């Protein structure tokens, strides 16, 4: 057990909680799997509270939150309108073993708002929605194989998890892979499955670990349409990550120009509460009706009320435009901040979800790790290998502070380059 010792400083509240967690929580909650590993200790892991775009850990350190809980923090932690809607519903009941009118209102909103959504399934996690989508596709087509991109994250479940431990090869066997933005490799994957393809699933925004994020090229999208026609596969847009951050409607299909048969949402749609959605075209309704896919908490009315309120506040507060403006300012400002330290950096992806990479870095992103840890030590939460997920609650003052602290963090990177032989200075 970690404790204050006569020689050293007293253990932090985070360290004490970590030590307790390591005894009773498997993998101690997964921090090491989030690829912080080089400077693990720098990152806050034990949160005390969060408000707007500020996160406070159990040691009282506060951070400007550019990671948005990996997506869910869209409008700001504890957004007043969302919290009010949730509280109102909570006063009536939450998981009641029966649906509420809130579910119908939410479904009506989603059907009216998104093409091609004529019906929805409501779940809790992104993995619920994507796994459900594949069931519908399999029922609709009578086929078995599904195709996804290499290094894409669609689910924690066996069919597509990026983690291998405990997953039998047979469970992966029906999931074929292609390279994102590579039409030839998509064609080859369809051939390899002998055209027995129930679904082609893509994200509107692809980011493999330690790779720069990319958007789909028109040629690739055209190949998806062509291959789907060729083998009759269902096209699934996994908008769990891109949803609410790529288009003012909240749906990325309008941003990239793909007309999917099924769309999956999760993460941001309830501003931090657990709601996910799979919605589909009328042509797939019969197949969807035939799928049994139930979850004890799928009808939680509090989360659904929060989801409804999130869509309303997203529109009424102009959240998309605000996030775009912040993202554009950060992208330009960070390039300038790096230049003052003599570094060249690139910000890639989409303004609301972008990743910074440093010229001359090694394949493992060592300098990105140095930079991210230096930012975190200065109270700005960024990840070395994952894009930021901006929220609309970031204030101009917070953005100023991020850019000021970035200058110092880039100076640390410059110093690391000067002292490490691997960067040949
Ligand atoms: N799809 C995408 C694109 C994701 O990024 C994720 C989660 N990172 C999922 C699906 C799975 O969502 P969840 O973690 O909520 O199950």
Image (cartoon, rainbow, N blue to C red):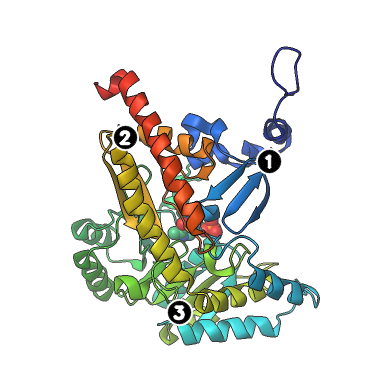
Residue in view at x 46 percent, y 47 percent: 402
Residue in view at x 56 percent, y 79 percent: 312
Q: Is residue 45 visible?
A: yes
Q: Is residue 331 left or right of residue 294?
A: left
Compare marks 3 and 1 and give the one earlier in the sequence. Answer: 1
In the picture, which quadrant includes the C terminus? top left
| Numbered badge on residue 60 | 1
Q: Secondary structure at mark 1?
A: loop
Q: Is residue 386 left or right of residue 378?
A: left
Up-down relation of residue 45 to residue 421 (above or below): below
Q: Nearer the viewer, mark 2 or mark 3?
A: 2
Instruction: Give the x, y percent position of residue 93.
Output: 79, 75
For the residue pair 421 and 204, the one nearer the viewer reads as 421
Q: Which residue is mark 2?
A: 341
CB within 8 Å, label 2 to label 3: no
Up-down relation of residue 179 to residue 362 (above or below): below
In the picture, which quadrant includes the N terminus? top right
> Seen from this angle, which residue lies furthest top?
7
Q: Is residue 421 left or right of residue 301?
A: left
Compare marks 2 and 3 and give the one earlier in the sequence. Answer: 3
Q: Which residue is mark 3?
A: 280
Q: Secondary structure at mark 2?
A: loop
Instruction: Tell me if mark 2 has few (under 14), some (14-19) or many (20+) residues whose alpha carbon lies within 10 angstroms of its own.
Output: some
The image quadrant that residue 199 belongs to is bottom left
CB within 8 Å, label 1 to label 2: no
For the residue pair 266 and 222, the one nearer the viewer reads as 266
User: Disc 3 versus disc 1: distance between alpha carbons?
Assistant: 45 Å
């Amino acid at each position: 057990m970690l404790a204050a010792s006569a020689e050293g400083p007293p253990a932090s509240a985070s360290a004490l909680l970590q030590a307790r967690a390591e005894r009773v929580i498997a993998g101690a909650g997964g921090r090491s799997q989030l690829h912080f590993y080089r400077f693990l200790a720098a990152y806050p892991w034990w949160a005390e509270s969060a408000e707007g775009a500020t996160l406070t850990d159990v040691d009282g350190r506060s951070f400007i939150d550019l990671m948005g809980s990996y997506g869910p923090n869209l409008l700001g932690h504890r957004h007043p309108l969302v919290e009010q809607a949730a509280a109102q519903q909570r006063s009536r009941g939450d998981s009641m073993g029966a649906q509420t009118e809130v579910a119908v209102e939410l479904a009506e909103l989603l059907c009216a708002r998104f093409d091609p959504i004529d019906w929805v399934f409501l779940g809790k996690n992104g993995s619920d929605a994507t796994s459900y989508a594949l069931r519908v596709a399999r029922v609709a087509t009578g086929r078995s194989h599904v195709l996804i991109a290499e290094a894409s994250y669609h689910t924690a479940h066996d069919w597509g998890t990026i983690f291998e431990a405990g997953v039998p090869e047979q469970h992966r066997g029906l999931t074929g892979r292609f390279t994102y933005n590579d039409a030839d490799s998509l064609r080859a994957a369809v051939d390899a499955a002998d055209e027995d393809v129930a679904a082609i699933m893509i994200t509107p925004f692809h980011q493999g670990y330690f790779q720069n994020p990319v958007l789909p090229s028109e040629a690739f999208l055209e190949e998806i349409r062509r291959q789907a026609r060729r083998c009759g596969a269902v096209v699934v847009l996994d908008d769990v990550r891109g949803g609410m951050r790529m288009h003012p409607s909240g749906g990325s299909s309008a941003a990239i120009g793909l007309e999917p048969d099924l769309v999956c949402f999760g993460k941001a749609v309830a501003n931090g509460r657990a709601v996910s959605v799979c919605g589909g075209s009328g042509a797939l309704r019969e197949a969807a009706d035939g799928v049994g896919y139930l979850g004890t908490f799928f009808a939680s009315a509090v989360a659904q009320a929060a989801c409804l309120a999130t869509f309303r506040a997203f529109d009424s507060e102009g959240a998309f435009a605000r996030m775009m403006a912040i993202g554009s300012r950060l992208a330009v400002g960070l390039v300038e901040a790096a230049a003052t330290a003599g570094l060249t950096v690139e910000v890639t992806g989409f303004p609301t979800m972008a990743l910074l990479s440093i010229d001359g870095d090694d394949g493992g992103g060592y300098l990105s790790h140095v930079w991210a840890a230096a930012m975190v030590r200065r109270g700005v939460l960024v990840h070395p290998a994952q894009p930021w997920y901006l929220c609309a609650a970031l204030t101009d003052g917070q953005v100023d502070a991020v850019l000021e602290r970035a200058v110092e963090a880039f100076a640390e990177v410059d110093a690391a380059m000067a002292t490490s032989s691997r960067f040949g200075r």
